Image (cartoon, rainbow, N blue to C red):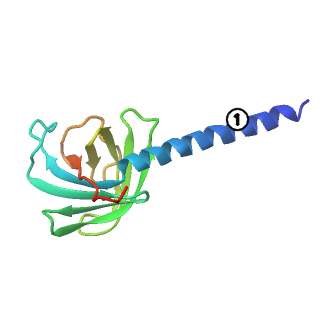
Amino acid sequence: MTTVIPVLGILAGLFLATAAENADLAERKKLVGVWKGYAVEGTGEKPVGPVKLTVTITMEEISAVQDDKQDLGAGTYKLDLSANPKRLDGTCARGQVPKGKYLGIYKLEGDVFKWCTAMPRTQEPPKEFRTGKGVYLMILKREPQPAGKK
């Protein structure tokens, strides 16, 4: 009987880990695609901002291009679905933007993706969807997938 309790604890831990991994996988699938929009000012009252962006998200990587020509960079990302708001922390490995960790929060509402992120030297992610010193808010809309690519 004493060995049953530790085994049940291990099984419960494996079940919770698997559930979290499944949720992460499902959320990544929702994020995969090409997103176009702007880095905006304030809270994004005006959805058009000074910087036009194309952000491409795969299951493992995020990359960004400014004004359809300037490669800003690419790197991996990590999600934290238990945080409120949800967290999306990127790590830039290459490109023109500073390399390092971009701690951020995000909101996905249908085909609109809001991502608020802080520059790499910042130790804390943003607490709200608002620009500030070293904090950027992107409001992006999902591009339709080409026919036959689902």
> How many residues crowd mark 1 within 10 Å: few (<14), some (14–19), many (20+)?
few
Q: Quadrant of residue 101?
A: bottom left
The residue located at (28%, 56%) in the rendering is 145
Viewport quadrant of the N terminus: top right
**Position of residue 73 in the picture relative to residue 76 (left or right):** left
Q: Is residue 137 something one can see in this rendering?
A: no
The residue located at (81%, 36%) in the rendering is 6
Q: Point out the residue furthest to the front here.
A: 148
x and y percent of residue 55 in the render? 26, 57
The residue located at (89%, 31%) in the rendering is 2
Viewport quadrant of the C terminus: bottom left
Q: Is residue 84 something one can see in this rendering?
A: yes
The residue located at (37%, 63%) in the rendering is 75
x and y percent of residue 9 in the render? 75, 35
x and y percent of residue 67 in the render? 12, 62
x and y percent of residue 131 in the render? 18, 42
Mark 1 — residue?
Answer: 12
Q: Nearer the viewer, residue 3 or 19?
A: 19
> What kind of residue is marked 1?
Ala
Q: Quadrant of residue 72?
A: bottom left
121 w.r.t. 94: above or below: above
Q: Nearer the viewer, residue 20 or 131?
A: 20
Q: Nearer the viewer, residue 49 or 149?
A: 149
- Say which element carries label 1: helix
